[in-house]
Amino acid sequence: MGDRWHVEVDRSVCIGSAQCVHRAPDGFRLDTARQSHPTEPEMDAAEGVLAAAESCPVEAIVITLLGSGEPVFPPED
């Protein structure tokens, strides 16, 4: 069994670029205000979701390991 992630979008930072939806259409959706939301706050680790977080121009997506809370993205310095 692989890692599980907790995925959050900081909607105070999100600019609605939709890069996340293009990179991981199963992982993110935009609401009527063009704000991103994860389709599920807890999901299996997936390359597409990580790519979506990495492609966000304002780094509004935060991914942590479920259980430990260890950061996946953005990485700790």
Image: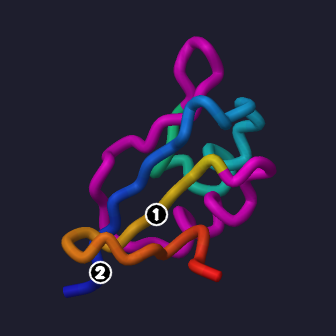
Q: Position of residue 56 (x, y in %)?
A: 72, 52
Q: Which mark is residue 25?
A: none
Q: Nearer the viewer, mark 1 or mark 2?
A: 1
Q: Position of residue 39 (x, y in %)?
A: 39, 41
**Secondary structure of residue under mark 1:** strand
Q: Which residue is mark 2?
A: 3
Q: Position of residue 26 (x, y in %)?
A: 46, 49
Task: Give the image quarter of residue 15.
Answer: top right
Q: Quadrant of the N terminus?
A: bottom left
- Residue at the location (80% across, 50% down)? 57
Residue placed most toward the observer, 75 or 6: 75
Residue placed most toward the observer, 39 or 35: 35
Q: As drawn, which residue projects farthest toward the top?
A: 32
**Secondary structure of residue under mark 2:** loop
- Residue at the location (77% across, 36% down)? 17
Locate residue 66 relative to residue 71 in the image: left or right: left
The magenta span reads 30-59
Q: Is residue 11 above or below residue 10?
A: above
Q: Is residue 38 magenta?
A: yes
Locate residue 37 relative to residue 57 in the image: left or right: left
Q: Which residue is mark 1?
A: 63
- Residue at the location (65% across, 82% down)? 77
- Local packing at callout 2 (Cα closer than 10 Å; few below 14, some 14-19, many 20+) is few
Q: Is residue 64 magenta?
A: no
Kindly identify the amino acid type of the residue bearing the numbered disc 1.
Answer: Ile
Q: Could you tell me if the residues under marks 1 and 2 are in contact, i.e. CB atoms within 8 Å?
A: no
Q: Is residue 51 above or below residue 3?
A: above
Task: Give the image quarter of residue 74.
Answer: bottom right
Q: Is residue 62 above or below residue 36?
A: below
For the residues labelled 1 and 2, the Cα–Cα distance comes to 12 Å
